[in-house]
Image (cartoon, coloured by chain):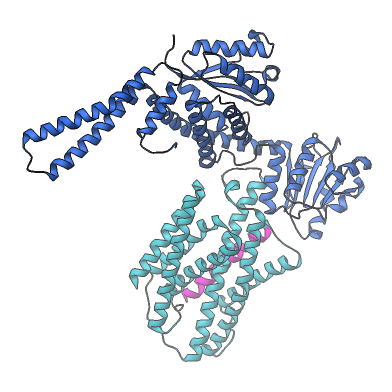
Amino acid sequence: MAGKKQIIAIGLNHKTAPVEVRERLAFSREDTAKVLQAMGENPYVDEIALFSTCNRVEFLLTSDDPVQAEEAVKDFMAEYKATPRHIFEEALYIRKGDEATKHIFCVASSLDSMVVGEPQILGQIKDSYAEACEHGSCGVILNRLMHRSFSVAKRVRTETGIGDHAVSISYAAVELGRKIFGELEGKAVLLLGAGEMAELAVEHLVNQKARPIYVANRTFERGVELADRFRGTAIRFEEVRDYLEEVDIVISSTGATDYVLVRKDFKGLMRSRKNRPLFFIDIAVPRDIDPEINKISNVYVYDIDDLKNAIQENIEERNRAATKGERIVDAAVIQFRNWFKGLDVVPTIVSLREKAEQIRQKELKKTFSSLPTLSEEDRSAIDKLTSSLVNKMLHDPTLFLKTNANCNDKALYIEMARRLFNLDGSNGPE
Amino acid sequence: MDLVFGFTIACYIISSLGYQGYILFQKRPVYRISSIFLWVGFVCHTGVLIGKYVQTGYIPVHSLHDTLSTFGWAVIGVFLILQIRFHLMVLGALVAPLASLAVIISSILPRPPIELAPFVQDLWRTLHMATLVLGNAAFAIACLVSILYLIQEKAIKGKNQGFFFRRLPSLKLLDSTGYASLIVGFPLLTFGIISGVIYAQTVRGRFWSWDPKEIFAVITWLVYAALLHERLAVGWQGRRAALMTIIGFLVLLFTFFLFFRG
């Protein structure tokens, strides 16, 4: 039996499913086309969109029969991905109505991401939505829902500053560098050793136009290789002390068991540097740079734990922003609910009649006040006339809405009627 | 005139509160409104000072009342000029209250009648006071920037990326703003002291009388001279330079009030 139309979000993400499950169920772009095609033909599914990223798989759909639609999606996933249901069923969450609206708003706003506030998710959702639009699988409800979620995401980003402040170690190093040097342009960088995180940090610095880049490695050949990558110069490890006079930022990541630089290496150094600040980023474990060096004036030493702490504070900052973001989302959910509720036959007819009655009363008042000589009888005759005029005019639209109340395109008709008579207050889609 | 002066004070106070609000909540509109109030206050203040000049024929630097008012005006002026080059948005939170304080104190101080002096004597006195007031304003800004520097430096050294770390600008910007203020202030101070010595000669017939006031004026000059020398020759910068700038200003303040106590 067809019930009331509902929005349903079915999916799994990094919080509910381990990566083994997520990778098994991820849908590629080509898959998506087939999925939308196949699910669109399902009698229980009305509108549908699919979002699949490395951290989540989400089906967003509308249906008159949520239970059946839910089963259909599960069956489809099991079949299409050749994965028994029990493997992923535990990890699935199913949200309906307001919960589903809230969920999709949160996802788009990056409040549900692994790294809260990361900016990629909105782009991914937009792409997937464009895909669904291409296949014509989105209707009135999902179109409205998706556009709302984009504007909510934008509001959350600009109003809470959720995307501000670095949350990766290599980027935190760059942010710190900026707080010390202002501009990083033209700041000389020395890379000691090698390593993924250290190289990433150098890359970030190069992107900020830091140069020249020097690379010192125990094996000179490896150093030359790395230097080529950053268009820098390889130097010998024994020369490091001399280059300390020139460079501004040192990123250290060697496998040495002892400190590579100790306090006595700095005797006279700051004087010959004319006290220009020097920033050490020590990513190595065990540490390369003696922490005592941090006590020297205008020298700053950050080790891996310090950087982690710096990020931790930024993460907490983001979480506070996320709380603010949720308030924006909650308000948007209520707004959407009001629109969605209106998307039914009865409320549409009610507001149609209310609007007509309002117009009738207003016009009557105008007419009566410009014709003060009218008798009581005349007035009641005019009143009757207008009333039956309105009733006759609204009879066919009302009947049309009622008879189409159970067909599949109901939402479309209602939305059309609401727009035609401008029942939501403003003309135009937004 | 008093009404305009009152309005100026009100503008400065609103602007001060606004800048504090900006530091707390980091909302651009708050900053912009505070800036507008500061500009309006500054323009009115300029009007007040010009009015005084027209009325009396003297640049208003002869009593503590006038000097403090002119000092407040100069601090804001130096700040607004620096703002064009350095965009130190948070500095307003210190500068505006300082200027407010100066004008508030000025407004409650007695306004003694101006003692007329022969033309040449008055010329030197006016030059002496005016350059010193401007120089003091520059040094006051240098001191405030140095305070911000020390706070930010402590946050970075202490690995405490909290409230101030986020809100304060880079060490480099703070350091160079402080340096720029010193470079503006020093020639003014030097000229102020020289003209003061000449003024003393016109009054007392002696250039130098080993008065504690005079000795302190020279000490102040030496402190700043040493600081600038170190900065230029050895490249002194950072924490030590900031501390020295603050100490210099404290000595300067002491000397300033020594003179007005008579």
Quadrant in the picture for the N terminus of chain B: bottom left
Q: Is residue B22 left or right of residue B147?
A: left
Residue A291 is at least partly visible in this image: no
What is the quadrant of residue B209 in the picture? bottom right
- In the image, residue A304 lies at what x, y percent? 73, 37
**A29 or A284, which is in the foreground?**
A29
Residue B248 lies in the magenta-colored region: yes
Give the vertical position of A246 relative to A225 (above or below): below
Q: Is residue A163 left or right of residue B232?
A: left
**A62 or A296, which is in the foreground?**
A62
Which segment is the magenta one?
B240-262
Query: Which chain wears blue?
Result: A
- Dominant SS in magenta: helix
What is the quadrant of residue A24 in the picture? top right
Chain B drawing hue: cyan
- In the image, residue A57 lies at what x, y percent? 62, 22
Going 66% across and 10% down the picture, which residue do you hit?
A79
Residue A330 is at least partly visible in this image: yes
Going 77% across and 61% down the picture, which residue do you hit?
A274
- In the image, residue B221 lies at what x, y percent? 63, 73
- In the image, residue B178 lies at what x, y percent? 62, 63
What is the quadrant of residue A333 in the picture? top left
Residue A23 lies in the magenta-colored region: no
Give the vertical position of A51 relative to A180 (above or below): above
Q: Is residue A425 left or right of residue B169?
A: left
